[in-house]
Amino acid sequence: MEALGLFLYIMAGGYSQRATNNRMAWSGSTVCKYFHRVLNAAYAMAADINKPADPNFRRVHNCVMQDANFLPFAGAAGAVDGTHIPIRVAV
């Protein structure tokens, strides 16, 4: 529960590791270790939870269709049109 609280504190508040170290009174390595444990667990669940509503990408959001800034991306499937793409941040 503490690791989840730490993760939400960092993600929701946008706090740095140093600010979190001071707030939680934990060492930097402890904060890093527990943050990454929860992050890895969330990533493992992402394949089951984060799925596009239309796996064939036939539907395009109205905001994308009406905005001229997105015209170069017409017909492309990607993050611009709401597709969830699994990623892993290099450490």
Image (cartoon, grey):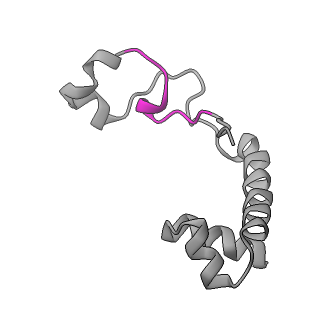
Horizontal side, residue 74 vs residue 66: left or right: right
Residue 78: image location, x then y, percent: 49, 26
User: Which image quadrant: the N terminus?
Assistant: bottom right
Name which quarter of the figure residue 81 lies in: top left
The magenta stretch spans residue 67: no
Nearer to the camera, 30 or 66: 30
For residue 65, which quarter of the picture? top left
Provide the residue span drawn in magenta.
75-85
Residue plotted at (61% across, 82% down): 22
| Main SS, magenta residues | loop
Give the camera-side residue of 64 and 4: 4
Q: Is residue 7 left or right of residue 44?
A: left
Q: Decide which of 55, 20 is in the foreground and name it.
A: 20
The percent position of residue 47, horizontal first and vertical second, equals 74, 40
Residue 45: x %, y % from top left: 77, 49
**Residue at 56%, 64% in the rendered image:** 11
**At which x and y percent is residue 50?**
65, 43
Total marks drawn?
0
| Residue 54 to residue 15: above or below | above
The quarter of the rendered structure image containing the C terminus is top right
Q: Is residue 91 above or below residue 81?
A: below
**Does 41 appear above or below 34?**
above
- The residue that appears at 71% across and 45% down in the rendered structure is 46
Q: Residue furthest left?
A: 68
